[in-house]
Each structure stands twice: as structure tokens, then as C-alpha cells.
Image (cartoon, rainbow, N blue to C red):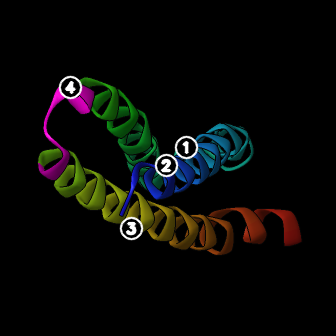
Amino acid sequence: MGTKTFSVVTSISLVLTVTIAALSIIGIVITGLYPGIIVLFFVSLIPIASRFYAKKIVGNSRVFQRNYFTTLTIINLLSILVVVAMTFVILVDRVFPVILN
């Protein structure tokens, strides 16, 4: 996987996780603190950290970069899946019962 794929996946992951983390603050106001929201904030640090690390490894060899870009791309894809699943669980478990009652 090249730097272009890494860049696109990281951008999507960054936008999605930061948006969901910001919207979860609204959820805290509506329903109170939910432990899953803390995990969302930690997962939102993954794309931020991978971007900083990608800038750090630019001077290394191509093989080294390719290995880390592949690994970081897979981690960012997994973080997207985790964020989407946790958002669904938080909405169904915490927000919908409060809104529907």
C-alpha cells in the first residue's frame, strides 16, 4: 500500500473519529457519562498519531516505509470499524431510550 492509500484512509479515519468524538460530547450532555465514550476518545488518537508517525518516517528506506504504511493503514481501517460499531451501540443503548421516552 502506498502513501496515497494511507493518506486517504487516515483522512477518512481522522474525520470520522473526531466527528464522532465531538458528537459524543453532546451525548454526554443528554444521557450522562458512558464508559464507551472514553474509548472513543482514545480511538480518535490513533489516526492523529499515525499521521505524526508518517511524517517522522519519511526519511527512512522505502521498504521500511511500505511496511509501516501498510500496518498503519490496516490499523486505521480497524479504528473506522470500531468507531462505527461503538457509535451504533452507544446510540441504541444510551441515546434512543432517552429520546423515545
Residue 44 in the image: above or below residue 76:
above
Is 60 contained in the magenta span? yes
User: Which of marks 3 and 1 precedes in the sequence?
Assistant: 1
What residue is pinned by disc 1? 14
Measure the alpha-carbon separation of dots 2 and 4. 20 Å
Mark 2: which secondary structure? helix
| Earlier-in-chain disc, 2 versus 4 | 2
Label 3: which residue? 78
Name the kind of residue labelled 3 in the image: Leu
Question: What's drawn in magenta, residue-wise?
Answer: 57-63
Which residue was labeled with disc 4?
A: 59
Q: Residue 68: give x, y in percent of width and height.
A: 20, 51
As drawn, the label of residue 10 is 2
- Residue flagged by tag 2: what amino acid is it? Thr
The quarter of the displayed image where residue 94 is located: bottom right
Which sits earlier in the primary sequence, circle 4 or circle 1? 1
Q: CA distance from mark 4 to mark 3?
A: 27 Å
Mark nearest the camera among 4 and 3 is: 4
C-alpha distance separating marks 2 and 1: 6 Å
